[in-house]
Structure formats: C-alpha cells, structure tokens
Image (tube, rainbow, N blue to C red):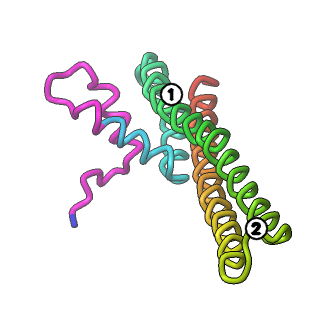
Amino acid sequence: MNNPYPQGKALALLAYTLDVDSDDTISRKELDRLVDEVCEDDTERARLVSVLANPNNSQLPAVLAELLSSRMDRLNDTLEAFEDNDAVYGVWSQRVAGGGLLAGIGFTVTGVVTGGWAALAIGAGILASGVTSVGRSKLKKRTRAARRSVEQTERVIDQIKGK
C-alpha cells in the first residue's frame, strides 16, 4: 500500500497548515484526522516539534496550535462524556445491582422465596453486580485513554507555544 505521506505525517500536517486557506487543500475532517494521527504517534510528535524549532513562517506555530486546540476540544468533550456516563450510569447501575443482590438475600433469609427461586434471586443479583462491574471497568479504561490523549495534546501545544 502506498504511503500518502512519504516524508511523514508531521511534515504533511505542516504543509497543509501552511496551505490551509487554499481551495485545493484537504477537508477539515481529513485535517483533523491527520492532527489526531500526529498527536497519537510519539515519532511524529517529536518530528513536529523538531521541525517547528526553526520555522520559516512565524504564523505557523499559532495556526498549528489552533488545530491542536480543536483536537483538544473534541477530546475534552469525549472525556467529559465518559466521566458523566460513569458518574450517572456506572454508579447508579452498581447501586441498583447491589440493592438487587441485598433484596435477593433478604427475601431468601426471611423465607419469602425458597428453593430454586431463592437461588435465582441471589444468582440474578450476583450476575447483575458482575455485569455492571465489568461494564464500569471498560468505561473507566476508555476514560483513562481519553485523559491520556488530552494530556498528550496539551504537551504538544505547550511545546509549540513555548517557542
């Protein structure tokens, strides 16, 4: 497969940044994708910072910082959505599952349900608790990944603005 950026994605990003006002440049969506790819790759981030050490165009760091800020806005929205989902759905689903487990145990101990129904009442509570714990764990993992992406982008912006 042909590499569309033989000189690297960081240099392609710089070229497109310089040509952002042109009619024949790439779309904003493709430019955002390229920014994401550069920020997610250690080598490309280092290449970008290295090339910006001696820019020929004094406006380039400001334009590039704006593109990275747009990425950071998208990532912050994603991070906030994950955190909100965990705070609302994750916490409450665990509370409901825990309450169901306690209710099942309570019904069994007091003799409201017996035999197979008692096992089902307790088993359903245990299953619900396990499923919500696994779901919340996956959500926490996605939240951590989103937070790391935000932090990476902040570091790149700081390095660019530090010039």
Image quarter where the N terminus lies is bottom left
- In magenta stretch: residue 20: yes
- Disc 1 residue type (three-letter): Asp
Q: Which residues are magenta?
A: 2-30
Residue beneath the point at 46% across and 17% down = 58
Splitting the image into 4 quarters, where does residue 135 fall?
A: bottom right
Q: Does 58 sit above or below residue 90?
A: above
* Residue 112 tag number: 2
Q: Secondary structure at mark 2?
A: loop
Q: Secondary structure at mark 1?
A: helix
Closer to us: 76 or 81: 81
Q: Give residue 99's position: percent from left, percent from top.
A: 75, 54
| Direction from residue 151 to residue 77 in the image, left or right | left
In the picture as drawn, the residue positioned furthest to the right comes out as: 109
Q: Which residue is mark 1?
A: 73
Q: Give residue 91's position: percent from left, percent from top.
A: 70, 46
Label 1 Cα crowd, 10 Å radius (few <14 / some 14-19 / many 20+): few
Residue beneath the point at 59% across and 23% down = 161
Q: Give residue 147's position: percent from left, percent from top.
A: 63, 43
* Residue 44 tag number: none
